[in-house]
Amino acid sequence: MSGTVHIIGAGLAGLSAAVRLSARGRTVVVHEATAFAGGRCRSYHDASIGMTIDNGNHLLLSGNRAALDYLRSLGAEDRLVGPSNAEFSFVDLAGDRRWTLRFNDGRIPFWVLDAKRRVPDTNVLDYLPLARLLWAGRGKTVGEVIACKGVLYDRLVEPLLLAALNIDAPLGAARLAGAVIRETLASGGRACRPLIARDGLGPTLVEPALAHLKARGVEVHMEHQLRSVQLGAERAEALDFGRETLELGRNDTVILAVPPYIAAGLLRELVVPTEFRAIVNAHFRIAPPATLPPILGVLNATVQWIFAFPGRVSVTVSAGDRLIDVPREELARKIWSDVARASGLPPELPPWQIVRERRATFAATPAQDARRPGAATRWHNLVLAGDWTDTGLPATIEGAIRSGNRAAEIIANRP
């Protein structure tokens, strides 16, 4: 139980590791290179629209057990909101057709037997091929395991996998797609209820963690960038922060919870994902109409998902590389045109902000999935964490928190 655990990175992977280790009585110090915690999951005040927004729109599900356990340990579980049942509303702008999927709670999917609850124009047999993804191994794409065409694919499978994998679904790793389906559709409605951080990602996932850690005496050093790790044959020996070098004691350990390209620069022999996909988010300062669902899936449009918040409508476009270089106002008008059609809001462009992340997630192809390292390294006091490590899930909040938990358990259980 002696020694200090140095956690490099205050994203959700690093924070979850710190929370878990501090609960076990370990001495923990967190080092964050930037001026804010949370990584990709953060909130900030944006002067362009005069309100606090999130850098991205992240959806959790009631089956994300690690994320919910994390919030429960912080006393912040009530900061997620969502419908009492598993429901997802969709609109197809090609024909202005609307429908709502309504899952039953149990694992047996009775909802596919009811034409009013399943995807319109589908039948029970259409759903059976999805089972092939549940047992898909490494090395295969989604397109090699199931037929990426048809009404069910267009109206449910593609939107689901595009959002989860952040890559064009046919190119995605089938084993990751299978994990998504196994933990959502195949687990029944109790696992599929959508949950949103209504007050923002920062107040929900980050600020409670920082307050929790402070109350337990955990030091969190912001703007404290790790420059290099001095490595011996079997252990990390020192952490170089530029202005100071921390010599690691015999019982000190390190959790490296940084993006893959940063980790590869610190550990030269480390194999990590090298290809990434973008996500584009848009925020509009306008009150959503009462008829707009909290989450709306949009088909045959630039927009993919619309989120309704108090005084704000936000949009997410996954696999958004094609939009990265589109002029900002042109993109805002293009996105708002879809939002206005889907929601019934006026066509005039309200105050807006576009947030584009070029390297939002690793490219969830079989080749890149194979490059994801495990948590343990050959240096016995150095462990990895991050949604890009081999969690068995795509790059998600749930995957990030599981990776932090796993890193903490490895350190806690080592003599």
Image (cartoon, rainbow, N blue to C red):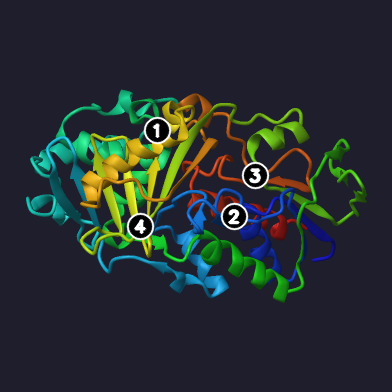
Closer to viewer: mark 3 or mark 2? 2
Q: Earlier in the sequence, mark 4 or mark 3?
A: 4
Q: Earlier in the sequence, mark 1 or mark 3?
A: 1
Q: Quadrant of the C terminus?
A: bottom right
Q: Earlier in the sequence, mark 2 or mark 1?
A: 2
> What separation in Å lies between label 2 and label 1 (alpha carbons)?
33 Å
Q: Residue at x 39, y 44 (%)?
A: 316
Classify mark 4: helix, strand or loop.
loop
Of the numbered discs in the image, which one, if any, rests on residue 286?
Answer: 4
Q: Nearer the viewer, residue 131 or 164?
A: 164
> What separation in Å lies between label 2 and label 4 (alpha carbons)?
30 Å
Q: Earlier in the sequence, mark 2 or mark 4?
A: 2
Q: Residues within 10 Å of mark 1 (few under 14, many from 20)?
A: few
Q: What amino acid type is highlighted by mark number 2?
A: Leu
Q: Residue at x 51, y 51 (%)?
A: 48
Q: Nearer the viewer, residue 355 or 293?
A: 355
Closer to viewer: mark 1 or mark 3? 1
Classify mark 1: helix, strand or loop.
helix
Classify mark 3: helix, strand or loop.
loop
Residue that label 2 marks: 12
Closer to viewer: mark 2 or mark 1? 1
Position of residue 230 measured from the top left corner of the image (x, y, whole percent): 88, 39
Position of residue 392 measured from the top left corner of the image (x, y, whole percent): 49, 42
Mark yes or no: residue 161 visible. no
> What separation in Å lies between label 4 and label 3 (alpha carbons)?
44 Å
Q: Is residue 69 above or below residue 142?
A: below
Of the numbered discs in the image, which one, if any, rests on residue 330?
Answer: 1
Q: Residue at x 54, y 66 (%)?
A: 203
Q: Residue at x 43, y 57 (%)?
A: 64
Residue that label 3 marks: 375
Give residue 143's quadrant in the image. top left
Mark yes or no: residue 38 visible. yes
